[in-house]
Image (cartoon, rainbow, N blue to C red):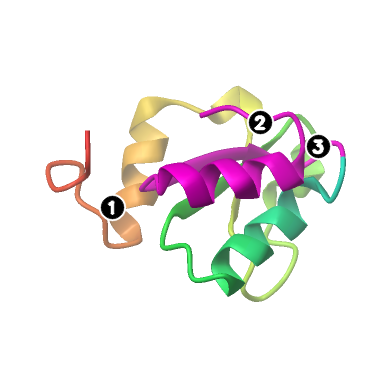
Amino acid sequence: GAACSGEEGIDEADRLRPDLVLMDVRMPGIGGMEAARRLSAGGNPAVVVLVSADEGLAEPLLVDAPVVVPKRKLCRTLLTRLWEERGVSLVAARA
């Protein structure tokens, strides 16, 4: 799925029920951080990884914040590690 705003991201994640959500921190509407919080609060089990071009946002913003990854470091190896750290095996994941 794809979305142009935080609200659309929530709708798509609820509709598609993915195992992994990649979301930009800065999006129109409520933005990625708030969208990630709402997904979690709504019981969506997806692992949320936020990405940002702003290197300063690469640190967790809140205690229960999802991971924030600099866009320049985003790669398959990093995503695999983050996903597996959160208890989802790539072998067991839905296709």
In the drawing, does residue 40 fall left or right of residue 9?
left
Q: Is 58 located above or below residue 95 in the figure?
A: below
Q: In 3D space, how far apart are the residues under numbered discs 3 and 1 (Cα atoms)? A: 26 Å
- Disc 3 designates what residue? 27
User: Mark number for residue 3?
Assistant: 2
* Quadrant in which residue 46 is drawn: bottom left
- Of discs 3 and 1, which sits in the foreground? 3
Going from N to C along the chain, the mark reached first, 3 or 1, is 3
Task: Depth check: give the residue in front, 46 or 80.
Answer: 46
Q: What residue range appears in magenta? A: 1-28
Q: Are the two marked residues, 2 and 3, in contact with CB atoms closer than 8 angstroms?
A: yes
- Disc 1 designates what residue? 84
Residue 78: x percent and y percent? 41, 37
The amino acid sitting under disc 1 is: Glu
Helix, strand or loop at label 1? It is helix
Residue 48: x percent and y percent? 52, 51
Going from N to C along the chain, the mark reached first, 1 or 2, is 2
Q: Residue at x 22, y 41 (%)?
A: 94
In the drawing, does residue 38 fall left or right of residue 31?
left
Task: Depth check: give the residue in front, 55 or 16.
Answer: 16
The amino acid sitting under disc 3 is: Met
The amino acid sitting under disc 2 is: Ala
In the drawing, does residue 71 fall left or right of residue 27?
left
Helix, strand or loop at label 3? It is loop
Residue 62: x percent and y percent? 72, 70
Task: Depth check: give the residue in front, 3 or 27.
Answer: 3
Q: Quadrant of the C terminus?
A: top left
Q: Residue at x 75, y 63 (%)?
A: 61
Q: In 3D space, how far apart are the residues under numbered discs 2 and 3 (Cα atoms)? A: 9 Å
Task: Depth check: give the residue in front, 29 or 11.
Answer: 11
Q: Is 9 located above or below residue 60 in the figure?
A: above
